[in-house]
Amino acid sequence: MAKNSLVKELCRRIDGYREEMIELQRRLTAIQALSPLSGGEGEGKKADFLVEYLKGMKFSSIERIDAADPDCPGGRPNVIARMKGKNSSKTIWIMSHLDVVPPGDLNKWTSDPWTLRVEGDRIIGRGVEDNQQGLVSGIFAVKALMELPTLPAYDVALIFVADEENGSTWGIKWILEKHPELFGKDDLIIVPDAGNVDGTMIEVAEKSICWIKFTVKGKQVHASTPGAGINAHLAASQLIVNLHKALKKSFNRRDKVFDPPTSTFEPTKKEANVPNINTIPGEDIFYYDCRILPPHMIEEVVAVVEAENKKVEEEFGVKVSMEFPNRDQAAPATPVDAPVVVALEKAVKDIYNRKGRPMGIGGGTVAAVFRRAGINAAVWATLDEQAHQPDEYCKIENMTGDAKVFAHIFTQE
């Protein structure tokens, strides 16, 4: 079958799977795959269901790798389903995650988060976009190929991992540590867990993340006698302003791959100090969220911060200390001309008639785990960015469209 005809037939079949895809979403949504850290029992029941579902297809192998999480008696499951291709020199991976986040305040939902609701072109329920859209799209892209008298250009593997929502300790990090032989340097890794509404963003790089908790200590006194104390709140306020100026001045490089194209340094959370108006606080606590463009190192930022801390200590007579709730140096970027990026660009162009653009983001994704291991990975999906929201929804056309993009990539020589 000619290439263009093959892609058209795959797309036609995927369009015909619409109701099956919704039904799989319905059954997955009903299984509350919550981490023990979120008060759940893990992803075991969801993995059990998924393995049985996949057995009804023509996969070459289905493997389950359970991680021994001491907080989860049944372990944390990771599932790999493989389809052999014409050439086994490399593997095309679609990686999605099994776990979801809790629904939060149920009063903010207009229906039961664990019961799928179809509303026009939207399906609504916890996990339907994050990350069941990618999970279901990958499965039905493979299903379309299996029903044709042809093989993918290379081996294809769907990997469904645990613990993505809480750091991936028992998911892809576990797999790469215990079974690094599963992945080759030439493999194409696609993570459908971030994207934009038109499917043009191909995420290839991330900024470093550094969250800083500042504790400023002075001396608490009655507000009518400020000279007898040291106003920690005043000193903290000055420090916030000083940091805002110093960090932006010191780290002003731009990189058009990223959106926004600069490092960002923002004061965010502020803890309560004193309960009443007529007391000068002796302690003030605030936080900064720093997203730092590579190749800058987090240590460079910390050095500038420490210098500003010292200035405020000397000016106000306070003591400033720091803690780092999150300190994550950016992984190496996936090159914009890497095979996985080129494959996505071709597929997005043919399926959506849009130009994909390699981009960097300020947030962190699980693709960084692969990049640190020296394996190029790209994050891509067509999303309305509903992750973690009440009344989370997935557009059905996004789900089918992403399946078509994956199927296109499976046919690329």
Image (tube, grey):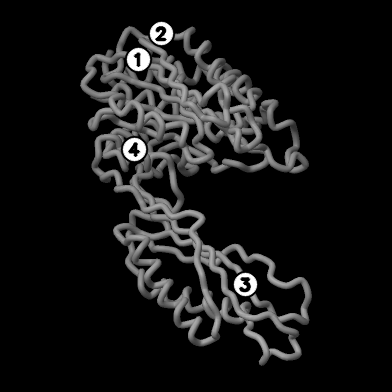
Instruction: State the residue in front, 83 or 216.
Output: 216
Residue at the disc numbered 2: 58
Relative to 233, is 260 on the left or the right? left
Task: Check disc 3 and report the residue beneath it.
Answer: 284
Q: What residue type is labelled 2?
A: Lys
Taking the image as drawn, is residue 341 in sight? no
Is residue 107 shown left or right of residue 100?
A: right
Q: Which amino acid does label 3 sit on?
A: Asp
The residue shown at (43%, 15%) is 143
Q: Earlier in the sequence, mark 1 or mark 2?
A: 2
Q: Which of the two discs, 2 and 3, sits closer to the camera? A: 3
Precedes in sequence: disc 4 or disc 2: 2
Q: Sequence-wise, which precedes: disc 2 or disc 3?
A: 2
Dot 4 falls on a residue whose secondary structure is helix
* Disc on res. 83: 1
Q: Quadrant of residue 203?
A: top left
Q: Is the Cβ of the residue at disc 1 closer than 8 Å to that at disc 2?
A: yes
